[in-house]
Image (cartoon, grey):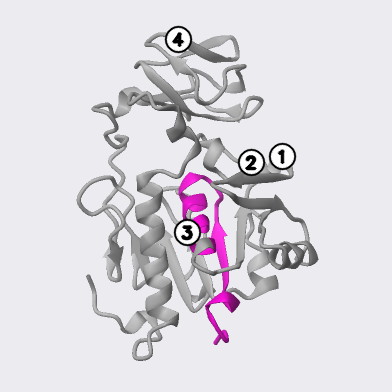
Amino acid sequence: MPRGLSDIRIIIRGAGDLATGTACRLHRSGFFKLLMTEVEHPLAVRRMVSFCEAIHEGSWTVEGIQSARASSLDEVEDSWMNGIIPVVVDAENAFRIKINPDVVIDAIMAKKNTGTRITDATLVIGLGPGFCAGEDVHYVIETNRGHDLGRLISKGPALPDTGVPGNIGGKTSQRVVRSPADGIFHSSLQIGSFVTKGTVVGNVSGSPVEVAVTGVLRGLIRPGTRVTTDLKIGDVDPRGEPSMCLTISEKAGAIAGAVLEAILMTFNNPIINRPHVLLGT
């Protein structure tokens, strides 16, 4: 058992916006031994608030918290010593063996379990659909917008994937920008730009990528990324506030709060110190 909360080793699988919101909340709460794992070519749309950008840029800062790409255990530990969140390319989750984490958080958002097991750490948490609390993880956290967003589930699954994006500013599916073809995505437009319905924000294999609503381009997949037909590659916020592109969303914040709750319940409770003895929600 770790000596204190700051000694707890936490792996977050994925470094997109929800994972990043979680990492920021934990870091601010005194958990400094965080490690985020990603694939070589992340598909994050809300890149301005996603630590996976460190994979390409070398380092990335979100709301004053810095991340940096690391490739070895020594570099991970150096980042920890300097108050930086390390991000490694580790699709196979090999760093789990290297650092022997106390907590594993699967924030890949694949809508299915890609290999996380309840035996991976003392506390294992899965975000959203694809996990069953009590079987392959200790806790599942609800990620569907609505009454139960951020609810901590200790028995059973989250709500199934509806395939319909959450309502923002009265828009759901219309605000999502999808690839019209297979190929490489090209764009010179910046996140935070104001767009109107029909604006062309880029192209894939010569096919234009248009937005369906007016608002601010809240997210856009990294230009040069290989994409597939119908893949989500952009997000328009009809509320039209550019500053929201640069800050962690209310959804990410709600999820991060639930993760923090689960960790504190497990490691900072003098009575309950194992998640599997908790009553179901």
Which kind of residue does numbered mark 1 sit on? Glu
Task: Give the quadrant of the C terminus.
Answer: bottom left
Question: Residue 192's spot in the image, x, y percent?
Answer: 50, 25
Lower position in the chain sequence, tag 3 or tag 1: 3
Q: Write down the residue under mark 3.
A: 25
Lower position in the chain sequence, tag 4 or tag 2: 2
Q: CA distance from mark 3 to mark 1?
A: 22 Å
Residues packed near mark 2 inside 10 Å, few (<14), some (14 to 19) or many (20 plus) = many
At a point 60% along the width and 17% down the height, the residue shown is 187
Residues packed near mark 4 inside 10 Å, few (<14), some (14 to 19) or many (20 plus) = some
Q: Which residues are magenta?
A: 1-27
Q: CA distance from mark 2 to mark 3?
A: 18 Å
Secondary element at image label 1: helix
> In the image, is 133 to the left or to the right of 109?
left
Query: Which mark is nearer the camera, 3 or 4?
Result: 3
At a point 42% along the width and 61% down the height, the residue shown is 126
Q: CA distance from mark 4 to mark 1?
A: 28 Å
Q: Write down the residue under mark 2.
A: 53
Residue 199, numbered label: 4
Lower position in the chain sequence, tag 2 or tag 3: 3
